[in-house]
Amino acid sequence: MLNIKVDDLTSNEIAAFLQAHIDDMRAMSPPESKHALDLDGLRQPDITFWSACLGGELVGCGALKQLTPTHGEIKSMRTGVRARGNGVGSAMLQHILAEARKRNYSRLSLETGSMDFFKPAHRLYERHGFEFCGPFANYREDPNSLFMTLAL
């Protein structure tokens, strides 16, 4: 059974998991187009971070950043390589959507890469009702980024 819980970002395991995420983003995107947050960036009061474990193994993570009292942003969604295709990303996304609704957000948005590497993420978000949109918050048009949003 998948266990999703708030994570305080202090374990070596989550640090290594997030470093793999940042390494992937650096390999796929030029520095000016990399928007993945490091540990300090995720330890902000406007961000809630969750880890997902299956049988005691860390298999995924995701975060929700409050942009305004009614608008949230998904950050740091990642499924570990060995767990991909097993519903971890969908479960984490559903968890974040439920929390956004509980907070009475009217909109949830995200930034992701535009390269083929990110196509599975695009499909995941589209399956859950997200639509492509223009930049939001402090983002700018960037050929390496795609933006998606969902009215809640």
Image (cartoon, rainbow, N blue to C red):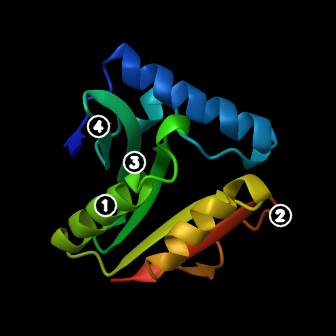
Going 82% across and 42% down the picture, which residue do you hit?
A: 30
Which residue does the numbered mark 3 point to in the structure image?
62
Helix, strand or loop status at disc 3:
strand
Q: Is residue 50 left or right of residue 83?
A: left
Q: Which amino acid does label 1 sit on?
A: Ile
Q: Earlier in the sequence, mark 1 or mark 3?
A: 3
Q: Quadrant of residue 131?
A: bottom right
Label 1 packing within 10 angstroms: few (<14), some (14-19), many (20+): many
Instruction: Residue under label 2, please give it.
Output: 143
Q: Residue at x 20, y 41 (%)?
A: 5
Q: Helix or strand or loop: what does disc 2 sit on? A: loop
Instruction: Work out which quarter of the rendered image holds the N terminus and state it.
Output: top left
Mark 4 vs mark 1: in front: 4
- Give the mark, 4 or 1, whose residue is nearer the N terminus: 4
Q: Nearer the viewer, mark 2 or mark 4?
A: 4
Answer few, some or many: residues within 10 Å of disc 4's Cα (few below 14, many 20 plus, some between 14 and 19): some
Other residues around mark 3 within 10 Å, as few (<14) / some (14–19) / many (≥20): many
Q: Which mark is residue 54?
A: 4
In terms of sequence position, does the residue under pointer 2 or pointer 3 come before the other? 3
Name the disc covering residue 96, or none: 1
Residue located 37% across and 49% down the image = 63
What amino acid is found at the position of numbered circle 4 in the picture?
Answer: Leu
